[in-house]
Image: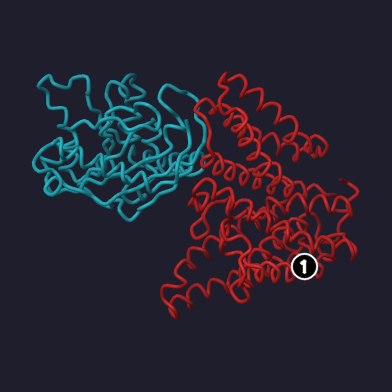
Amino acid sequence: MNWLTNIPFVLKLGYGGVFLLLVIGTILSIILPKVKPGKWDDLVPRMKSWWVMCGLVLAALLSGWKAVVILFAFISYLALKEYMTLAPTRKQDRGVVLFGYLLIPLTYALVWINNYMIFLIFIPVYAFFAMAIMMALTKRTDGFLTTSGIVNFGLLTCVYNVAYAAFLMRTPAAELPAAGPAGLVFFLILVTQFNDMSQYMFGKVFGRRKISPNISPNKTWGGAIGGFVATGILFVWLAPYFTPLTFWPSVFIGATLPIMGFFGDITMSAIKRDLGVKDASLLIPGHGGVLDRIDSLIFTAPWYFHMLAYFALERF
Amino acid sequence: MIDLLRKAIQIFLARPIAKFVIGMDVIGRDNLPTEGPVIVAANHNSHIDTLILLSLFSTKVLHNVRQVGAADHFLKTRMMSWISINIIGMIPIHRKKAGQGEDLLADSRAALEAGRILVVFPEGTRGEAEEMAGFKTGVARLAKDFPDIPVVPIYIQGAGRVLPRGSKLLVPFNCTAVVGEPINWASHSDNDRHIFMENLKVTIQELSTEASPLRWD
């Protein structure tokens, strides 16, 4: 049981807390449908999926940076596939789309070899060039600009932005509190999911005025502001245990990160509206697709990373 | 031994590929048959339709599933025909011999008599990607011989984008399978093969509206 004793105490608490939440949720998912039949029926598949998702992330975090890189590469792949399935492409673009998938192992290979500088420009600059060249070679010109925009948007959101979460694992432990790099990733995911959930719950209680009825009818000012405040407080409270941030930078990130999560959510909702679907796929029972689950993370991961880099991390 | 090998390949190779390399969204899973004899009719755009259909059925009934496939295509080499028949569970049909007085459906009939779940692609060929061609009448002939057995319609979307006919490049996209409520000869044919096939085709086309829109041109 050596590996167990090697886990920093804060992370043990964090993982234990997640486990406790899962147990409570599972008990509720069994009780609530009996109390009020019909209203809570999707709670059982939802909770089952939570067990699988939390299990995968925790297992990867416990196994170290290599496992986290592989897990996020796989998440990027599933998300990009959902995006490419729904987004309009042309018959000639199959090769371009395949090339897009091949950029996933290349991007995560840069995380693997710890080359931050090339990682930064790889997708935004060079994948962008490569895509344009490949599409020019298909010889079809109608819809060229539209499709190249569509493909690049998918790569930036599903691959580049998500890979930042994995790159956090490459932070030198010497720069971090006891929780280490796994603590940074755990904290990012915890805060992002807490933000989603608290906005939903505040919305149920205080939600009156809708923010953007034509994009996301469930989003209300009451829910959003309540969620931002709750998440901000959680962030500032826990930041000293998981990040090297000092007080005022943690207040700044605590105030801005929940807003980024909110924008990630409504941006993906707007895209799904545009494409005429409610969920990106049916892969995760009770949740929809991978893209539906990570929509906030797509915006919070780079922001969290860059802000940490700016305020605290020498490495980046 | 071969049964075990088939099961292992179907569960540990075919399914993970269908689920993660391609990605399957299934609508109307409750309509999937759990026991034979039953005919399953699906539209056909790609070789991966075979894989998709294998991945739909639960592992408990998988051993009972047989797919009708073109003998001129799948029996080309000894290796391919061994794999097709023993691993995929294919019932070869000699479509080139149609109209020569030979009973092409004998094996399919025998499979139904043995209580199999028989998968048929009524278009008879893959055709143009993501377009449905006219239906041949083989399914109707079978249904007429077994007027009470259900014919389960399945619409598959996206397979033609993953691996269209004539392409060797497999590009991952999620596919959708919409499983409809079964029809049968007794109540959907007016005792006419063409009316039955028309009903089947319309049913599958209606199922297509339940899938997410596919934008690909």
Q: Quadrant of residue B121?
A: top left
Q: Which residue is mark 1?
A: A232
Q: Is residue B68 above or below residue A43?
A: above
- Give the chain coloured red: A
Chain under callout 1: A
| Amino acid type at image mark 1 | Gly
* Mark 1, secondary structure of its residue: helix
Which residue is at 53% across, 75% downward? A27
The spot of residue B203 in percent (x, y) is 26, 44
Which residue is at 32% across, 22% downward? B73
The spot of residue A250 in percent (x, y) is 85, 63
Q: Is residue B72 above or below residue A300?
A: above
Q: Is residue B104 above or below residue B65?
A: above
B17 or B64: nearer the eye? B17
Left or right: where A298 falls relative to B63: right
Which residue is at 25% across, 44% downward? B117
Q: Quadrant of residue B160?
A: top left
Q: Colour of chain B?
A: cyan
Left or right: where B54 falls relative to B183: right
A300 or B168: nearer the eye? A300
Q: Which residue extends farthest bottom?
A: A35
- What's the coloring here? by chain
A188 or A1: nearer the eye? A188
Q: Count residues near mark 1 (Cα–Cα under 10 Å), then give few for <14, some for 14-19, many for 20+.
A: many
The spot of residue B84 in percent (x, y) is 33, 30
Question: In which quadrant will I find the N terminus of chain B?
Answer: top left
Left or right: where B82 falls relative to A143: left
The spot of residue B85 in percent (x, y) is 30, 31
